Amino acid sequence: CFELLLADSMAYTLSPTLVGPAGPQECVCRVELSVSCQNLLDRDVASKSDPFCVLFLEINGKMCE
């Protein structure tokens, strides 16, 4: 959907990744997330499960992964 371009050490500028004329840009704050899980079920038959976390961000009414 979008790529994060480094604007300075505490903020990023959101910019469309599509080629074309530059549109308006939004300044967003840096956020650090920490995810911790316990007692996850092992759903993989052949080996140990590799759990992961997916973050969705709503941009212009569209959810982006």
Image: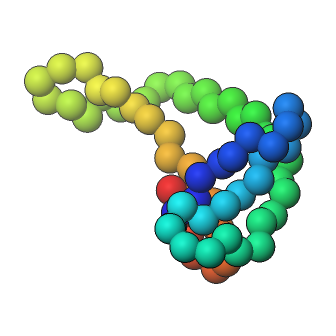
Left or right of 23? Residue 55 is left
Q: Relative to the observer, which residue lies in front, 37 or 33?
A: 33
Residue with the most extreme top position: 48
Q: Could you say where residue 17 lies in the image, as x and y percent from the top left?
A: 54, 61
Colour scheme = rainbow
Figure check: 48 above or below 8? above
Q: Could you say where residue 34 lies in the image, as x and y percent from the top left?
A: 69, 30
Q: Residue at x 44, y 35 (%)?
A: 52
Q: Residue at x 67, y 77 (%)?
A: 60
**Label tally:** 0
Residue with the most extreme bottom position: 61
Q: Residue at x 59, y 52 (%)?
A: 3
Q: Relative to the observer, which residue lies in front, 49 or 11?
A: 11
Q: Could you say where residue 43 lies in the image, as x and y percent from the top left?
A: 25, 34
Figure check: 4 above or below 19? above
Quadrant in which residue 7 is drawn: top right
Quadrant in which residue 10 is drawn: top right
Figure check: 63 above or below 34? below
Q: Relative to the observer, which residue lies in front, 44 or 54?
A: 54
Q: Relative to the observer, which residue lies in front, 43 or 21?
A: 21
Quadrant in which residue 8 is drawn: top right
Q: Could you say where residue 32 lies in the image, as x and y percent from the top left?
A: 76, 34
Residue with the most extreme left position: 46
